[in-house]
Amino acid sequence: MRIWGVTGTNGKTTTAWVLGEMLGGDTACGHVTTVEVWTGRRRFSSGYTTPPLPVLKEIFAEMEGAGLKHCTIEVSSHAIHQRRTGDTVFAGGAFTNLTEDHLDYHKTMDAYFEVKADFFRRLAAENPGAPAAVCVDGGYGRRLADICRALSLDLVTFSTQGEADVMARDIAVAPEGSVFTLDSARLGGAHAVRCPLAGRYNVENVLAATALACGAGVPPDGILAAIPRLEPRWGRLERVASASPATVFVDYAHTDDALANVLSTVKGFTKGRVWAVFGAGGDRDRRKRPLMGAAAAAHADRLVVTSDNPRSEDPAAIIAEIASGIPEGTHVDYEPDRAAAIRLALAGAEVGDSVVICGKGHETTQEISGVKHPFDDREQVRAFTF
């Protein structure tokens, strides 16, 4: 069984899932993601982005027993640093992006980057010639591409902004998805593509999967056929039916970069106002909180700042740190009760508006003072009444 790793700050889950579809779907490829593990026999949550090695070995054994030929897996920076994947030899890897997150653990962005780079250094050492798909739209990606060029790897660059081995051009986004031109010599040239996943950042995720699938030797016809079959899932810009007159989405965005991406995407196709409901997790990187406030204010018309998973922290203190990054004059409400915050936005939104509920996505619990309470943003939206 060939194991394909996906690392980066944002987009790992979607990229791993899309790559699995290109590698043959559920009958050929298992996955290990933040949301779900699929072994070919059962689906479950491991409780980790990247599980510890003893759990991984059991998962891989079950996949092989089910006859799967591939596995895609999210490889977090914590997992790389802690060597959670142990002696796993990867068939190839993809790098999505690097933005501020986890600095409570890594301390500096340079240290965070070096951990990501270590994944590819180890890949080259253990599997010379393996494909490495790298997004070159940011400085860290270009820096990583230079490192990979000096290693014995089959580098496949991808970009939505400039020249690369796999490129997306003429991108247009709408609530029902995206259309773009996918251009790569590895795919035989340019192809008009319709993708049911909305958002420019989802185009980037599809490109990441495409680049690694090219390196994995998937035929172009297989890659191109998989893209139109994709459907929004797992709380990644997932549209949810509601009694509110607005269009409502639930998304996992929980960093300033992810908020900017999802809110700017929704802003691009919304005729009215964009409402952002969001918070920040407790006992995690505090430095990103004001950045999240600033990013939301820059890309949404109305903010509702609330709790995410406060864990052991005081929700009011977390909200205050987010508020420190929100400029004066911003239309913002502060409501620590997440259910009440969601209702506030849904009740206030009008026809033509979009409401984006950010931060928890697929999660079905909210952790407060060490206790996990049942809570699903999607169910809150569906249950809303005036």
Image (cartoon, helix red, strand yellow):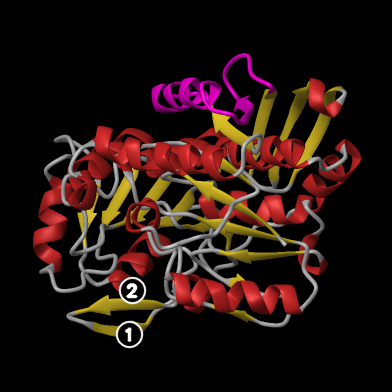
- Up the image or down, 228 lies above or below 376; here it is above
**Distance Cα–Cα, label 1 vs label 2:** 12 Å
Asked if the stretch drawn in magenta spans residue 149, the answer is: yes
Of residues 217 and 135, which is closer to you in this image? Answer: 217
Q: Residue at x 48, y 64 (%)?
A: 34
Q: Image quarter for residue 324?
A: top left
Q: Residue at x 59, y 72 (%)?
A: 37
Which of the labelled discs sits on residue 373, or is there none? 1
Relative image position of residue 237 (x, y in whole percent): 55, 53
* Quadrant where the C terminus is found in the figure: bottom left
Secondary element at image label 1: strand
- Up the image or down, 110 lies above or below 285; here it is above
Q: Image quarter for residue 293?
A: top left
Residue position for label 2: 339
User: What's the magenta region?
Assistant: 136-165
Relative image position of residue 151 (x, y in whole percent): 53, 27
Horizontal arrangement in the rendering, residue 341 relative to residue 38 (left or right): left
- Residue found farthest to the right: 221
Foreground mark, 1 or 2? 1
